[in-house]
Image (cartoon, rainbow, N blue to C red):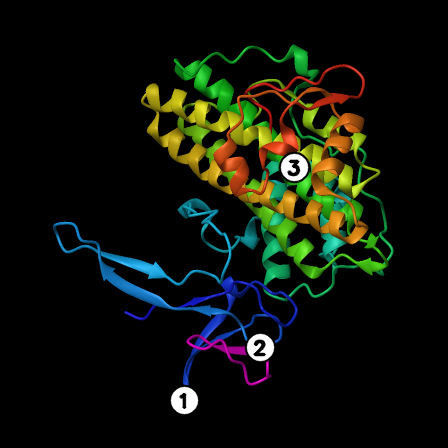
Amino acid sequence: MQLYAMESTCPHLGADMGHADIEDTDVGLVAVCPWHRYDFDLKTGHSETGLRACTFEIQIRNSGDEGNDQVIWVEAPGDGEWEVVELRPVSEDFADPPNLSRLSLNDAGPTQPQEELDQPPPTTLLEWAVLILNTSQPQLKVDRTRQAVTAFRTGKLKSVGRNKPLARPPPDMPPRDQLNVVQPGKVAKRGKAGSVKSRIAILHALANIEQWAIDLAWDMIARFGKEKIDGDPLPHQFFLDWTKVAEDESKHFSLLRNRLEELGSYYGSHTVHAGLWESAQQTSHSLSSRLCIIHLVHEARGLDVNPATIAKFRNAGDLDSVKVLEIIHHDEITHVTAGHRWFSFLCEKNGVDPVATFREEVRNHFSGALKGPFNEEDRRKAGMTPDFYEDLRGELGQPTQMNDQTY
């Protein structure tokens, strides 16, 4: 058995090396970047181009327990403090490449315009983002997300589209197909997961959140992708991060929808609300505000409440749903990490303090207190230390409801 550890980002232009080809050459195994075919020795990280990727030593040691089990040890990534942020479980339902044959008129839904379906595929990432935001049918939204992300990640979609005018702007409100959308206060009570009916209601509410989360990731790209920070365009890694978030949210929606069907229900069986998108509209003017309110307030709140939701389903004996919810929770930590990373990037570029700036953004663009109890451990994994969020209240309008279904 041969095991290697290498950084996941190509040092050339930031391609995802998780999708590199592995080739056996005269000098050993190399990882070949999917974008420009740069090769990197898996042992040393050296490339014939002169670049070098970071590699880490791997050791296989006995666990010390009875049974002679072995444990894989990976070299720590340099000096300083660090911790494992993610050990990601893989959903087999979403492990394979997208089935592009599903991108057909049969999946379009009754509200998808015929003229849109007849158009050729977009040629830039921003065009894909706008197309997906305007896709009302949820399965088609998922399929298009997977097609766009796969093409961008593997280099088949080469242009972000920063310098190309968009034929149409992102929608003010992404359309929804065959859903009964009501005001947040009009959604029926969901219960505490003690019955199948209650668990269906909770899973349906979470699926609704995940569908909005797909749109929020693409709106991040479509609305802010052409921005310049201190005169410079956003780095390529920005787009890699948010396409990954979009793909994750598509996976989450698919897992939840499948689980609803296994329980004898379906997505669309309950009323839904668009409260999360209201926060997106309130922050559409500012990348900093969007990162703070959507990802470091709403999505971080999900880290607080997810463990309690998982415990309710476990106590009810619904272990299949627990598996789905645990996958979602692990992924959401990385999404808050992405929000924190790019907010910190903006603060560094603008020469401002991240904590003070975050607290000011919340006061100006959020209503009501940030309520505990906080999941300090998982928030800290994502970069959110308590000085960001403790004793903080937003002063915008009427208080926003932050309950157990928040993002």
Q: Residue sitting at 41 percent across and 76 percent down?
A: 43
Q: Is residue 127 above or below residue 330?
A: below
Q: Which mark is residue 295?
A: 3
Q: CA distance from mark 2 to mark 1?
A: 17 Å
Q: Earlier in the sequence, mark 2 or mark 3?
A: 2
| Foreground tag (2 vs 3) | 3
Does residue 195 appear in this view?
A: yes
Q: Badge 2 is on which residue? A: 37
Q: Badge 1 is on which residue? A: 26
Q: Nearer the viewer, residue 179 or 199?
A: 199
Residue 87 location (% of width, % of height) = 42, 48
| Amino acid tagged 2 | Arg
| Foreground tag (3 vs 1) | 3
Residue 262 location (% of width, % of height) = 40, 29
Does residue 144 appear in this view?
A: no
**Residue 8 located left or right of residue 291:** left
| Image quadrant where one finds the N terminus | bottom left
**Residue 235 located left or right of residue 155:** right
| Image quadrant where one finds the C terminus | top right
Q: Residue sitting at 67 percent across and 43 percent down?
A: 217
Residue 59 location (% of width, % of height) = 30, 65
| Amino acid tagged 1 | Asp
Callouts 2 and 1 close, C-beta under 8 Å: no
Q: Is residue 115 above or below residue 300?
A: below
Residue reaching furthest to the front? 80
